[in-house]
Image (cartoon, rainbow, N blue to C red):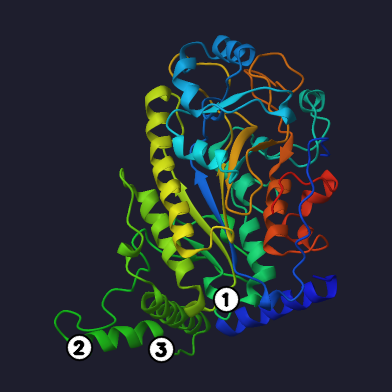
């Protein structure tokens, strides 16, 4: 898309909504994905799976070659997973990582299968940054750092916001992508959809985050049929919350409520039944969230959507205690839900049109506190989809030992890839031009032009 065309798209989006109410030698170039002829472009969507609490990345994707595993086992002490348990989910040697081998957590066999199929990639040592940062610069505080590192609320915000600000951020990079691309959708209210709760990730300047429950759209109770066994009471209630008013705020509330009711009716009428996509065993709230996302994707023609950004979430990753058992339980849930979701995409024939990726508050310490790990910084994340060039690690996998050039204490690592670069990758894949990527994540200009993930 040319710069002029992209800005026209942005202006179109704004008018529609107002009517509706650091360089690495391992970096790989993306395929050319400019969005010329955007209206005719095939459907695309991204799905963010946010792992709330700070996922323990060290036990999620583990060194498996003997030398690497020995370092890991020594550093992790009581938290290390036995090497023989890792054999079924281990990879072959990877040239990009100097011939090293790795293994997925034993609870992630479906992730390993998708890796083997070339549909899943790992991005190593990703985290919140303001500018490229070294260990020395961190220790000397000689460059700007993200606010309140190691704080849950602030680092959740730093990961989700359009730039690394702490709690209270108003714009998210998913929402800013929506701002730029919502003009491709007939119903812009279905551009940014959360099935995982309210989050700044989907907040745009113009696009409004649309929330659904884990079982689908949630209607306002009492506005249809009867209220207290009275049809007239229901009608009066609806008129009360949707009617016009001379008071500016009351009137705007009525406009928003009307829009919500209309959107709910359209979405409810368009969605296929949940049984279209059978839930996995074990089932979970995350599986139900992804089921709703799959149903919304399947209704894209009826909804008039061509570009969408989704958020789903799974909590329970703040494993200061009982890490070996609780972490395994949460990853088992993620494994079953994501495996089912990818199967549903294949069922619809859109596996090449949808990319799902993980995010989390932060990584966790390499050190053990005896029964768990504590808040960290850089972490490893998964990206999967039919268009992902997988079976690869992008970025540099950090050593699982202490005192390295990126260790700022307790094995916490200075990220080698910024969240801004992570976000820019998905923005480009969805069709945001290189020129307009800084409108999504302004600080990306601090990191040069390196790209950290390849798509077909």
Mark whose residue sits in front, 1 or 3: 1
> Quarter holding the N terminus?
bottom right
- Which residue is under mark 1? 188
- Which residue is under mark 3? 243
Mark whose residue sits in front, 2 or 3: 2
Q: Say what secondary structure mark 2 lies in.
A: helix
The percent position of residue 373, horizontal first and vertical second, equals: 50, 22
CA gap between label 2 and label 1 equals 33 Å
Query: What residue do we see at 57% from left, 35% from top?
Result: 151
Query: What residue do we see at 64% from left, 36% from top?
Result: 148
Q: Is residue 200 left or right of residue 241?
A: right
Q: Is residue 9 left or right of residue 290?
A: right
Earlier sequence position, callout 2 versus callout 1: 1
Q: Is residue 193 left or right of residue 271?
A: right
CA gap between label 2 and label 3 equals 17 Å
Mark whose residue sits in front, 2 or 1: 1
- Which residue is under mark 2? 231
């Amino acid at each position: 898309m040319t710069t002029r065309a992209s800005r026209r798209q942005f202006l179109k989006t704004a008018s529609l909504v107002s009517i509706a109410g650091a360089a690495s030698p391992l970096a790989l170039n993306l395929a050319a994905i400019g969005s010329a002829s955007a209206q005719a472009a095939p459907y695309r969507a991204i799905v963010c799976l946010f792992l709330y609490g700070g996922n323990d990345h060290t036990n999620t994707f583990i060194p498996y070659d003997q030398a690497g595993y020995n370092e890991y086992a020594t550093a992790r002490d009581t938290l290390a997973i036995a090497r023989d348990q890792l054999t079924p989910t281990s990879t072959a040697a990877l040239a990009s990582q100097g011939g090293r081998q790795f293994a997925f957590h034993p609870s992630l066999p479906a992730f390993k299968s998708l890796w083997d199929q070339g549909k899943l990639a790992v991005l190593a040592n990703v985290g919140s940054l303001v500018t490229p940062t070294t260990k020395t610069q961190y220790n000397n505080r000689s460059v700007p750092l993200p606010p309140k590192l190691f704080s849950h609320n602030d680092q959740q915000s730093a990961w989700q916001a359009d730039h690394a600000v702490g709690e209270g951020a108003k714009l998210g990079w998913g929402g800013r992508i929506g701002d730029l691309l919502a003009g491709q959708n007939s119903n812009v209210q279905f551009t940014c959809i959360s099935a995982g709760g309210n989050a700044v990730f989907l907040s745009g300047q113009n696009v409004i985050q649309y929330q659904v429950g884990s079982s689908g759209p949630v209607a306002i109770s009492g506005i249809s049929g009867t209220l207290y066994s009275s049809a007239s009471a229901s009608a009066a209630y609806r008129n009360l919350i949707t009617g016009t008013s001379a008071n500016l705020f009351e009137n705007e509330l009525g406009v928003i409520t009307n829009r919500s009711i209309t959107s709910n009716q359209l979405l409810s009428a368009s969605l296929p039944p949940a049984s279209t996509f059978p839930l996995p065993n074990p089932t979970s709230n995350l599986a139900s969230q992804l089921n709703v996302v799959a149903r919304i994707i399947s209704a894209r023609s009826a909804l008039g959507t061509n570009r969408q950004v989704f958020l789903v979430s799974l909590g329970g990753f703040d494993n200061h205690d009982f890490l070996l058992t609780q972490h395994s339980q949460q990853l088992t849930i993620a494994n079953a839900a994501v495996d089912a979701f990818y199967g549903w995409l294949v069922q619809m024939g859109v596996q090449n049109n949808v990319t799902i990726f993980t995010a989390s508050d932060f990584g966790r310490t390499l050190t053990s506190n005896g029964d768990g790990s504590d808040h960290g910084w850089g972490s490893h994340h998964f990206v999967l989809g039919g268009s992902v060039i997988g079976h690869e690690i992008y970025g540099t996998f950090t050593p699982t030992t202490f005192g390295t050039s990126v260790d700022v204490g307790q094995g916490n690592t200075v990220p080698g890839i910024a969240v801004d670069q992570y976000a820019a990758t998905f923005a480009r894949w969805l069709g945001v031009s290189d020129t307009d990527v800084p409108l999504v994540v302004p600080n990306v200009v601090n990191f040069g032009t390196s790209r950290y993930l390849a798509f077909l």
